[in-house]
């Protein structure tokens, strides 16, 4: 069993939808661009993921219990929209952060995406969240020369057996990941480890990760080698039966680990160069009724992907929307134009209901 076989099993079980030029790139968390009003623009090329992490907040991978489709975006569509958003922001220190509701390491056009993003005027940094395992040394060499600046590495244990258990994948090999980290650093890509701390499951492992990351030179002295994430159960995500730490407990345990190990484990927004920047306007408000062309299934069963009409041909004003409807209506809805009431539009992520 390999990660490719795992991916094939998803492709057989769910509909894989290719998103091209005709679909706006803003409006969903599943793909495209998410702008939260800072200089960091989230770019989401795919929802596919061959792992099934036990805590996955977006319920991805072969063990997903709620997905009925997956998305892969054409790089030209993504880059065209990204260029427009960067221009709109009007700043010269945009960080393009490749992440999403899947594993960017399996996106087939990753190198093109990084190269294209890095060449946009105003983009000063390209970073990516990944488990790294799915990339080869050759991929890393190409990503380095395409301009990838940093990898935020998802890694939760150095113990091969526990690492496989947490990743929900019998083929996942954390020793291989460590080799790839060394290669990434050698090729000039910085790496920062970002383990999810699951109290009672990987407490000692988090300490081991910090020691390893420090000794292997992660962060390169520019950033802490490890930025630990607190486990937070999400409504639609997979949940782990652990005692959830309060934020107060989490920060105080980080501070005592910092003292004990002599390693800094937090970074300020200044160090990470994250600051406010113009946010894309919200062209539609909550409770507004809009005309929507339904084009495909949405990510989650019972959701459909729609395009709000009329289109203006610009990322500033065109939006996709996730429309909640009975999945049994699939044959009637896809290809139809419907009226939808918007129920959510935070950060330009649109959710609506059929009326
Ligand atoms: S946490 Fe990330 S790598 Fe793990 S299943 Fe979810 S999307 Fe995949």
Image (cartoon, rainbow, N blue to C red):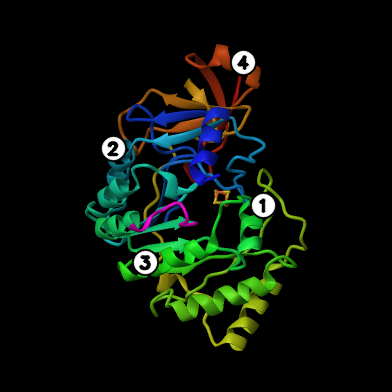
Q: Which residue occupies the extreme front position in the image?
A: 1
Secondary structure of the residue carrying numbered label 4: helix
* Near-viewer residue (240 or 119): 240
x, y percentage for residue 245?
Answer: 72, 67
Packing grade of label 3 (10 A; few <14, some 14-19, many >=20) is: some
- The earlier-in-sequence mark between 3 and 2 is 2
Q: Which residue has dot 2 on it? A: 76
Magenta stretch: helix, strand or loop mostly: loop
Position of residue 19 measured from the top left corner of the image (x, y, whole percent): 40, 31
Q: Nearer the viewer, mark 3 or mark 4?
A: 3
Q: Is disc 3 placed on a helix, strand or loop?
A: helix
The image shows residue 26, relative to residue 119, as above or below, that is above
Residue that label 1 marks? 54
Could you say which is closer to the camera, residue 40 or residue 60?
60
Alpha carbon separation for disc pair 3 and 2: 29 Å
Quadrant for the N terminus, please.
Answer: top right
At a point 30% along the width and 67% down the height, the residue shown is: 187
Mark 1 or mark 2, earlier in chain: 1
Q: Is residue 133 magenta?
A: yes
Q: Which residues are magenta?
A: 131-137
Residue 282 position by quadrant: top left
- Please name which of the two marks, 1 or 2, marks the residue nearer to the observer: 1
Of the numbered discs in the image, which one, if any, rests on residue 329? 4
């Amino acid at each position: 069993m390999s990660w490719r076989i795992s991916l094939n099993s998803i492709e057989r079980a769910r509909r894989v939808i290719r998103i091209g030029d005709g679909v706006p790139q803003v409006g969903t968390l599943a793909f495209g661009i998410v702008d939260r009003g800072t200089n960091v623009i989230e770019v989401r090329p795919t929802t596919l993921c061959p792992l099934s992490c036990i805590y996955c907040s977006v319920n991805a991978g072969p063990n997903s219990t709620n997905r009925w489709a997956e998305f892969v975006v054409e790089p030209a569509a993504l880059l065209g929209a990204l260029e427009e958003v960067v221009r709109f922001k009007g700043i010269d220190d945009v960080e393009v952060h490749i992440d999403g509701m899947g594993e960017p390491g399996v996106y087939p056009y990753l190198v093109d995406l990084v190269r294209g993003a890095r060449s946009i005027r105003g983009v000063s940094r390209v970073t990516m969240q990944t488990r790294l395992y799915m990339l080869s040394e050759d991929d890393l060499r190409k990503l380095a020369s395409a301009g990838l600046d940093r990898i935020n590495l998802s890694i939760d244990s150095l113990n091969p057996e526990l690492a496989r258990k947490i990743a929900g994948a019998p083929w996942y090999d954390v020793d291989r990941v460590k080799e790839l980290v060394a290669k990434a650093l050698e090729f000039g890509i910085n790496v920062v480890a970002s383990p999810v701390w699951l109290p009672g499951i990987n407490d000692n492992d988090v300490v081991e990760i910090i020691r390893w990351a420090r000794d292997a030179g992660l962060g390169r002295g520019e950033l802490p080698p490890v930025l630990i994430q607190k486990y937070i159960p999400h409504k639609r995500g997979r949940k782990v039966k652990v005692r959830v730490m309060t934020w107060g407990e989490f920060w105080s345990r980080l501070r005592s680990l910092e003292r004990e190990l002599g390693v800094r484990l937090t970074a300020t927004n200044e160090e990470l160069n994250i600051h406010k920047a113009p946010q894309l306007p919200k062209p539609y408000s909550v409770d507004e009724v809009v005309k929507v062309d339904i084009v495909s299934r949405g990510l989650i069963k019972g959701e459909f992907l729609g395009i709000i009409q009329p289109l203006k041909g610009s990322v500033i004003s065109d939006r996709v929307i996730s429309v909640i409807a009975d999945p049994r209506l699939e044959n009637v809805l896809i290809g139809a134009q419907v009226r939808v009431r918007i129920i959510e539009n935070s950060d330009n992520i649109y959710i609506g209901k059929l009326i």
